[in-house]
Amino acid sequence: MTISQIEIRNIKGISHECFKVQLKAYKPNLLVAPNGFGKSSVATAFSSLNTKRIDLAEKDHHRENDRLAPELSITVDGQKLAADKTKNEIRQQFDVLVVNSGLTPKAKKHFKGAVSSTIEVKPITICKTPEKAEFSYKPAEAKASFGQNGKILPNISEQLKAPRLLNAIQGVDLSKFTQVRIQAAVQAIVDKVNQQNGSAAVLSQWILNNCIHELRAVPFLNSISDRLVQYGAADSEIEGFFAAYQIASLHAADSKAFSAATDWLHYVAIKAHYQDLLANFKSSTWQWAKVEETKKKKELVVNFPKAHQLSNGQRDIITLVVQLHKTLYEGSKKPLILVIDEVFDYLDDANLVAFQYYVTSIIEGYKARNQVIYPIILTHLDPGVFFDFCFNKHKIQINYLLAKPTGKAQNTLRLIEARDSQEQIKDRLEKYWFHFHIDPCEIPECEWPNNLPQDWRSSGKFHNYTQSELARYLGNKNYDPLAVCFATRIAVEKLGHGLLVQDNQKDEFLETKKTQSKMDFVANTGVDIPESYFLLGLIYNTNLHWNQGRDYVSPLSAKLNHPTIRQLISGLYDVAYKKGV
């Protein structure tokens, strides 16, 4: 299944937006948009879903007006599923979980009415704390119940205290042990064993020589036996079988008590897991997150110190990883939409690797259990930052939420492709079209690709086009983002060239490859270059080498939409194209 559209109405900063996306199961799906765009509104839309409807907090209504009806819909394989104040078709088919940093302000009243406030991290509830329960197992009673050769039964007291017991019986229907056919088969084995003489070792060898096929004919006990041997909880197939026999007998004697004991064992395993998880991330001897039990609510929670007692990066990675692991432990019967709200602001390279590792682990965990998961990651970061780490760039799905100009960039894309595919004109395009040069150049018609505008054979005509698109961009009209990139690059290089005094320096500048290198050359001559020329490298350093299937337009549009970038380019335009050098 593919989620192809997300539509939101009247939630936080979004009045009405319809996002065309491609969200696929088992893949890291990035939703990329600049800061201030409204990514948190997308996260809020999903987090407000309960099982029956959208339930928005008062502050999360658009313009804080609760008369504006909120709505969220997704389109899955052509089917639209909607949620509003009266229905929730999304939760009928999907489970939804939103993960975020958990920061919240907290006010405290002091003596004489004074009030102070702090920023705290909300505790994360892991699970309910069950009543402590243990298996009512007594080795002597088990041996006596078996018969005269009860010595064949291993003492499983330690196995019943180890969480790996849960893995040994996972997916096994222990109630089958009471079925007449199975009871008859097991009792026949017990009777034969009790008719023999000798030590436990002698009995074990006799069973191996005479009854092994009868043991193997009880599949569900053998399934448990195999796992006990695999986990090192039993030394042999025979020992594993009689350990499984005792486990099944305990269940048959009192299934409710057995269930209560396994619930407690599961709880102990979860608690130990989260304690180890937090210990693995501890890099300070000061305050740290703790796994604790609450007495009133009887819950297992992860409590955090005050926000200022943890670094921002530590706080973000711990809250993220704990919530991701909670997702894996809880599981999901329906396909899960996992929304990870922007948590990357303070992650260094190592923690960014850790984040990607854990997201990948969650995906693989769901896949191993044949459960479907759609990880959706809201971020303002350039997707290129993820390609250097754990996410495989052939698996990652990138979706830009910012509306992009359409249709205008087709010819510019073809020019980029031609620069890397048309060997006979490649060098000329690189020198005169892709960079500033004081001399014009025109490519003969016989060499010019027939899928490009004919007037672009002249480098001057092409640069006239990019300048006109730059003017359209600054005038808030539909524009070609790639043309704006070209125009910005040419303007910076033109102005840099104009700052040089000596002719030999100007000649060397023109022969230097790459805009950044050209500007470094100018700076090394001792010329004072305006800082904006370097800052706009965010735009002019865009990789314009052809890569089939790459989205060149959307990431550039997202950057160009920023008001500061627009202001910097406007100033550059005035100097380079209106006033000249």
Image (cartoon, grey):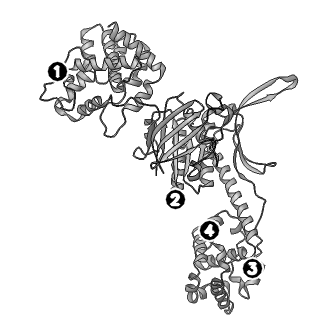
| Residue depth check, mark 1 versus mark 2: number of the one nearer the observer | 1
Q: SS for tag 4?
A: helix
Q: Where is residue 403 in the image (x, y as percent from the top left)?
A: 44, 31
Q: SS for tag 1?
A: loop
| Residue depth check, mark 4 versus mark 2: number of the one nearer the observer | 2
> 61 or 310, which lies in front?
61
For label 1, the residue is 442
Q: Position of residue 262 (x, y in %)?
A: 70, 64
What kind of residue is marked 1? Glu
For label 4, the residue is 168
What kind of residue is marked 3? Ala
Sequence order check, earlier mark of 1 and 3: 3
Sequence order check, earlier mark of 4 and 2: 4
For label 3, the residue is 142
Query: Are the residues at dot 1 and dot 2 in contact (C-beta closer than 8 Å)?
Result: no
**Local crowd at mark 3 within 10 Å, few (<14), some, or many (≥20)?**
some
Distance (Cα) linking label 4 and label 1: 76 Å
Sequence order check, earlier mark of 4 and 1: 4
For label 2, the residue is 368
